[in-house]
Amino acid sequence: MLVLCFEWELQKADHSCLKQRCVVLRFLKFPPNQNKTSEEILHHLQNIVDFGKHVMKQFFGESYVHHGEIVQLPLDFIRQLCLKIQPERPESRCDKDMDTLSGYAMCLPNLTRLQTYRFVEHRPILCIEIKPKCGFIPFSSHVSQEIKHKVCRYCMHQHLKVANGKWKRPSKYCPLDLFSGNKQRMHFALKSLLQEAQNNLKIFKNGELIYGCKDDQDSVSDWNELARHLKPFFFPSNGLVNGPHCTRTIVKELIHVITMALLSSTDACRAGDMRTIPISQGRSYCEASAFNKELVRNGKHKLESSGLPRGCLLYKTLQAQMLDMLDIEGLYPLYNRVEQYLEEFPEERSTLQIDGPYNEAFYEKLLDLSTEDDGTVAFALTKVQQYRIAMTAKDCSIMIALSPCLQDECSEQRPVVLASKSRFTFSVSVLDLDLKPYESIPHQYKLDGKIVNYYLKNVQAKDDPVMSSLFKENEDCTLVLHKVTL
């Protein structure tokens, strides 16, 4: 299932979502020949809306989550739309077909635009999309490899992705630096994302994508082009000269503004009653982080996290991620317990709410944070559902929309972030909050093993001469058995 975004001007509509000047329509996509009835598609879309409305809003807060609504559209319009956008679809996404038969879609606000104040709609708008990934090191006693207590999943996975040809080089970005709350570490993390954006950072101007590094692009020329787009935002009437100094200054301003927006709290409502494991329980730095390595190289003590403000979206995202209290290694046996129960009692799948409905009752069951296994299916199911929430939070995207704000327009009611020569009103939102599939857990278990084993054998072993010789000995060793006559 993928997201399709486009702007649609509509003069008259029965749905409140469509009355906005610019909206996003999202259609379900399926592999070829996988037929779904209109009722099944409507049910699927309703589950997505309900999950955002009744569950994820409890974690993130009212102003950060936009669950949208379901709309029914003329089939002719959908078919014409499909033909129009097909040539523009990336080749990697053409393995699935857009649903053109049911007539149902999700209508959502365009999060590349400000979500709080309509008075700035006529002004230029900058939007930064960040996919922060998992911001903590596993603290579960079920972890079998010590390396997982030292190096984060993202940093390990980078090496496997490069080996598989997905990227040409690993990124220096480490999620633990971004989630640290320490501005120096956050600045380093954001600069690393800008250098190797991969699919974790995009920048839009007035809704149009202007930056999202491809693997074969030159980051220096990319930055110069980005600075050209950003200069009117940060130095609207300044005679800042062109060149490397200008580019570095503008990028530095951008990083500062993103950091301040991420640390801000723009939600007056408390985000539910969920309380997870204290963030301080886990290690606050990753040994593979380029920032941490630089400190060690210079003989300095590591910088501990400064702590995230409780109201900011990063804090809430991390709290939701830390519902993964057992790690996939501790969770997988519980998944098997649920599977064995369903094999014996398949009719119970609906009662267990594995496929929904995602309502208040579903959320209430997530509040049990105990980790002592009593051997029941109920305990196993609770941990499985919490893990699915955590995986959703680990893969979500944060959207920061910024628009220039004049001095007399700024007030206590409007969140504002300051740069050296300008000020911005802004909104922060979160998207990609579909609940991760129950059926994906075995895949996650196998992938975790591949990531860790590859890192141990091909990265850590090369950094550690003793480990390297051990691997070499293991590879070259031949055991010869001789028949012995007694």
Image: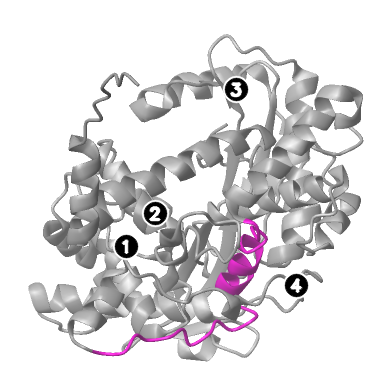
* Picture disc at residue 275: 4
Dot 3 falls on a residue whose secondary structure is helix
What amino acid type should be assigned to the residue bearing mark 4? Answer: Arg
- Mark nearer the viewer, 1 or 4: 4
- Residue 471: x %, y % from top left: 24, 46
Q: CA distance from mark 4 to mark 2?
A: 28 Å
Q: Residue drawn 40% across and 56% down? A: 154
In terms of sequence position, does the residue under pointer 4 or pointer 3 come before the other?
3
Q: CA distance from mark 2 to mark 1?
A: 7 Å
In terms of sequence position, does the residue under pointer 2 or pointer 1 come before the other?
1
Dot 2 falls on a residue whose secondary structure is loop
- Residue 356: x %, y % from top left: 82, 38
Residue 349 within the segment the image draws in magenta: no
Dot 1 falls on a residue whose secondary structure is helix
In terms of sequence position, does the residue under pointer 4 or pointer 2 come before the other?
2
Assess disc 2: are there few (<14), some (14-19) or many (≥20) residues with their C-alpha within 10 Å of its C-alpha: some
Magenta residues?
300-326
In terms of sequence position, does the residue under pointer 1 or pointer 4 come before the other?
1
What amino acid type should be assigned to the residue bearing mark 2? Answer: Asn
* Picture disc at residue 200: 2
Residue linked to disc 1: 193
* Picture disc at residue 375: none
- Residue 55: x %, y % from top left: 77, 55
What amino acid type should be assigned to the residue bearing mark 3? Answer: Phe
Where is 441 relative to 193, above or below? above
- Mark nearer the viewer, 4 or 2: 4
Dot 4 falls on a residue whose secondary structure is loop
